[in-house]
Image: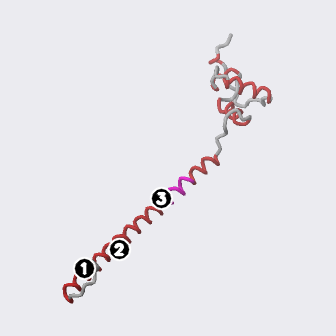
Amino acid sequence: MKKLNDLSFDKHSTRYSEKFKHQVCQEYLTGEYTKNFLARKYRIGGKTRILTWLRKYGYVEAKSQDMKKTNKSQIKEETKKNQNESEEIKRLKKQLEEQKFQTEMYSRMIDLAETEFGIPIRKK
């Protein structure tokens, strides 16, 4: 009897029937065997082919490039949004500082007018 490790892979494998593909997928999903083991057992051209079948027949969720692109575009949008928010915060801080300075100047002008001209401006 041949050892499992002695089995060779046929890189240019033949087409497999739908029934066979489903059988291999279900055998993998039982948890008894790994994709590598099943690939060697049935002389399938590699574990990625089994993974492809699992995705194709809905046994596992498909990993799409669109999801990757969406995630990348979302990250770019969030980064841009964060940069815009950061710029807005800087602008508002500057505006606040200017308003504080202006308020201080008005307060000093009122103090000066009250002392120099003796005019009560502030209500008590």
The part of the image, by quadrant, that contains residue 57 is top right
Residue at 64% from the left image edge and 17% from the top image edge: 4
Q: Nearer the viewer, mark 2 or mark 3?
A: 2
Q: Amino acid at mark 2?
A: Gln
Q: Main secondary structure of the magenta part?
A: helix
Q: Position of residue 91 (x, y in %)?
A: 41, 69
Q: Nearer the viewer, mark 2 or mark 1?
A: 1
Q: Which mark is residue 99?
A: 2
The part of the image, by quadrant, that contains residue 41 is top right
Is tag 2's residue or tag 1's residue first in the polypeptide sequence? Answer: 2
Q: Quadrant of the C terminus?
A: bottom left
Q: Is residue 60 above or below residue 95?
A: above
Residue at 46% from the left image edge and 61% from the top image edge: 83
At numbered mark 2, what does the secondary structure look like: helix, strand or loop?
helix
Viewer-nearest residue: 47 or 120? 120
Which region of the structure is painted magenta?
Answer: 74-83
As drawn, the residue found furthest toward the top would be 1
Q: Amino acid at mark 1?
A: Arg
Q: Position of residue 51 (x, y in %)?
A: 67, 33
Viewer-nearest residue: 16 or 51? 51
17 horizontally vs 112: left or right: right
Disc 3 marks which residue? 82
Disc 1 marks which residue? 108
Q: CA distance from mark 3 to mark 1?
A: 39 Å
Q: Amino acid at mark 3?
A: Asn
Q: Position of residue 54 (x, y in %)?
A: 70, 32
